[in-house]
Image (tube, rainbow, N blue to C red):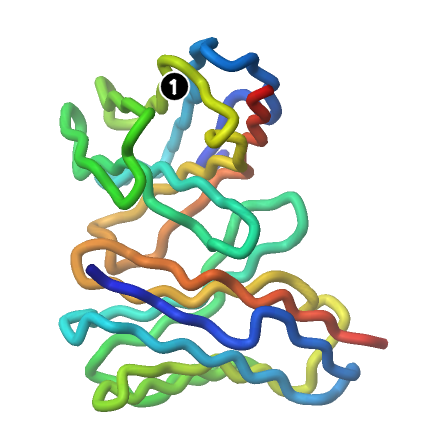
């Protein structure tokens, strides 16, 4: 079945710096790759997603890139702010969504 | 529009007890899911439903049962709770399928002693 790996597991950056989280997946049939942000005590919330026919997608300070050949995709957050501190999950989907183990991001003011 | 709600928010069970977690959504979504979240393991799919009256197994279904008698509700049951079922449980829904945004509830923290 599908397996999604995510690195790093924890990440600390200074406010204003960029943060990058990388994921790999195993099922070449996966065609949908969402990223979720989970704040403390809350459920995950979608922040950006990308489909297999697109290589890159950007939404303000957040961007996602996808390399289908290498089966990896990445989340880029620029100009980080303290409110970006949260746990981020990548996922890959064909008929089911499989989540990565998560990255705890801390933005230090 | 409440989105996805979960009842209860917290629960403590003794080993062997049973309970039911309730998930409700008011977005008319066809697909509903139950996940468990454990430290360092992300979200793992327990069971899911593709519509009223349907259920299917996910990655970790053992020890759990589900029912979807009404489109807006998805129930997760533990017949005989075990300490290994201590976790945070999340319900989610999506439309029109799994490869679209999932909307999550706030979670239920369950402790089995």
Label count reads 1
Percent across and percent down for residue A91 are: 36, 64
Q: Where is mark 1, residue-wise?
A: B78
Q: Residue furthest toward the top?
A: B17
Residue at image point 48% right, 63% down: A89
Percent across and percent down for residue B39 are: 56, 50
- In the rendered image of this protein, does residue A80 appear above or below residue B67? below
- In the rendered image of this protein, does residue A108 appear above or below residue B35? below
Determine which quarter of the picture holds residue A105: bottom right
- In the rendered image of this protein, does residue B26 appear above or below residue B79? below
Residue at image point 58% right, 31% down: B109
Q: Is residue A59 left or right of residue A82?
A: left
Residue at image point 45% right, 44% down: B104
Given the image, what chain letter belongs to the residue carrying mark 1? Answer: B
Of residues B95 and B19, the one nearer the viewer is: B19
Q: Is residue A51 left or right of residue B42?
A: left
Percent across and percent down for residue B19 are: 44, 13
Q: Secondary structure at mark 1?
A: strand
- In the rendered image of this protein, does residue B88 appear above or below residue B63? below
Percent across and percent down for residue B91 are: 41, 37
Of residues B109 and B23, the one nearer the viewer is: B109
Residue at image point 49% right, 34% down: B2
Q: Is residue B112 left or right of residue A74?
A: right
**How many residues crowd mark 1 within 10 Å: few (<14), some (14–19), many (20+)?**
some
Quadrant of the rendering where the C terminus of chain B is positioned? top right
């Amino acid at each position: 079945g599908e397996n999604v790996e995510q690195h790093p597991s924890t990440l600390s950056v200074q406010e204003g710096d960029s943060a990058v989280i990388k994921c790999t997946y195993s099922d070449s049939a996966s065609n949908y790759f969402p990223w979720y942000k989970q704040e403390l005590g809350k459920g995950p919330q979608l922040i950006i997603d990308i489909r297999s026919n697109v290589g890159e997608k950007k939404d303000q300070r957040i961007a996602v890139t996808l390399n289908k050949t290498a089966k990896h995709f990445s989340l880029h957050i620029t100009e980080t702010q303290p409110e970006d501190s949260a746990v981020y999950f990548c996922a890959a989907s064909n008929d089911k969504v499989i989540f990565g183990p998560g990255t705890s991001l801390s933005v230090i003011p | 529009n409440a989105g996805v709600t979960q009842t209860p928010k917290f629960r403590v069970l003794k080993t062997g007890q049973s309970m039911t977690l309730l998930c409700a959504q008011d977005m008319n979504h066809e697909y509903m899911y139950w996940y468990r979240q454990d430290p360092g393991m992300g979200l793992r799919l327990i069971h899911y439903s593709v519509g009223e009256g349907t259920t299917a197994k996910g990655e970790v279904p053992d020890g759990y049962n589900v029912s979807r008698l009404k489109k807006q509700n998805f129930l997760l049951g533990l017949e005989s709770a075990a300490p290994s079922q201590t976790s945070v449980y999340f319900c989610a829904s999506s439309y029109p399928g799994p490869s679209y945004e999932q909307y999550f509830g706030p979670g239920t923290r369950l402790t089995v002693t």
